[in-house]
Amino acid sequence: MAAYEFKLPDLGEGLTEGEVARWLVAEGQEIGEDDPLVEIQTDKTTVEIPSPAAGKVTSILVAEGETVPVGTVLVVIGGDGAAPVGEGQPRAEEAPQMQAAETRPADVAQRVRATPLVRRLAQELGVDLETVPGSGPQGRVTEQDVRAGAGSGVASEHAPEGRREPLRGVRKLIAAHMARAHAEVPPVTWVEECDFGAVDLKRIVPLTLKAVAEALQEVPELNARLEGDEIVYLNRYDLGVAVQTDQGLVVPVVRDCDSRSVDELADEVARLGEAARANKLKPEELRGSTFTVTSAGKLGGLLTTPIVNYPEVGILSIGRIAERPVVRDGQIVARPTGTIAVTFDHRVVDGARAAEFGLAVIRRLEA
């Protein structure tokens, strides 16, 4: 069959690029139409893409962990693995060929067939790719080829120290998101103790979501956005809930927390948490939150200073709840006590209003 070039499709939601999270096939493998082909990491979730054609996987052109723009050729199915002349996009692992009259020294190295990860490894180990014979398909230089070259003395005297692991997947997205929040948001954290004696701790997250949604109606500055020179006050209460997974922290969104019952919120939190840990969340379940709640349970520590989930302007965290001595009616008694911390964007929210919000949440939980 003629070679079929599969390009990274437009995944919607205004996305312009995606990361190859995991290949579900290998070079040389036969694949049927609509069989699982590749997992693509978008801004916060992973999408499994089926194969649009049947045939032999002749060439995988983008390595796992690489981020490429929409329209990049990811894999060739059928043919001999080479792109048809005059068709297709430049592959992620090689620059377009220059005309001989325009060739510069840097272009010579680009003609070596190797993925960006292999090129990075060669740079770290001090290996000249021009001197390494490639053992992969079409003479592609593999990671094993580079390491063999380093072992034969091609490497520089000072090898990099420690085990290295590429920043990829959810962790890469978290890094970018947190860096942007830290760069753009001037944060302040307000903290107060809360008596959780009236709270069923098994239902602490849905109860807190309900309390937060009601308190946000009293202090609308925390259910807002800063867009240019305008503060946008939102009239919906879609709250993000931080969930720890094996891939990293994700924040699915619980919709309509103001109008749902605590039982309905509990069911939705359980469903979203299970989907998050199974990596089954839909892209729309991760977007559009207006405020975020986070709780690490027994791992929460005495208190935390959470980072605002940009572009939101506030986030609430619950510290570890434990029996602690407190004064009640002049007597020292043991009560299940924890901390409520509210981090807020000080460009939008004043400290007094953030305190009013935090106390409104505590008042509801203690009641």
Image (cartoon, helix red, strand yellow):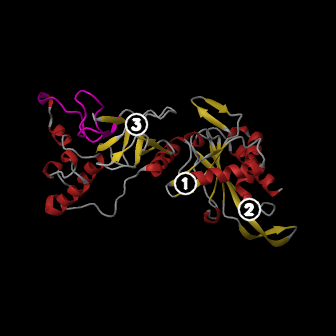
Q: Nearer the viewer, residue 88 or 327?
A: 88
Residue topped by disc 1 = 278
| Label 2 SS | helix
The answer to whether 12 appears left or right of 168 in the picture is: right
- Between disc 2 and disc 1, whose residue precedes? 2
The part of the image, by quadrant, that contains residue 144 is bottom left
Asked whether 306 falls inside the magenta stretch, the response is no
The residue under the point 55% across, 54% down is 278
Give the magenta range: 72-101
Q: Whole-percent x and y of residue 4?
A: 31, 35
The part of the image, by quadrant, that contains residue 365 is bottom right
| Label 3 SS | loop
User: Quick check: 185 above or below 87?
Assistant: below
User: Quick check: 317 above or below 82?
Assistant: below
Q: Nearer the viewer, residue 106 or 261?
A: 261
Number of the label disc, if any, that sits on residue 201: 2
The part of the image, by quadrant, that contains residue 231 is top right
- Between disc 1 and disc 3, whose residue precedes? 3
Residue farthest to the left, as pictured:
101
Distance of label 1 from label 3 (alpha carbons): 25 Å
Q: Whole-percent x and y of residue 354?
A: 70, 46
Q: What type is the residue that disc 2 sits on?
A: Leu
The answer to whether 367 appears left or right of 294 in the picture is: right
Q: What type is the residue that disc 1 sits on?
A: Ala
Quadrant placement of the N terminus: top left
Q: Tag 1: Cα neighbours inside 10 Å, few (<14), some, or many (≥20)?
A: few
Q: Tag 3: Cα neighbours inside 10 Å, few (<14), some, or many (≥20)?
A: some
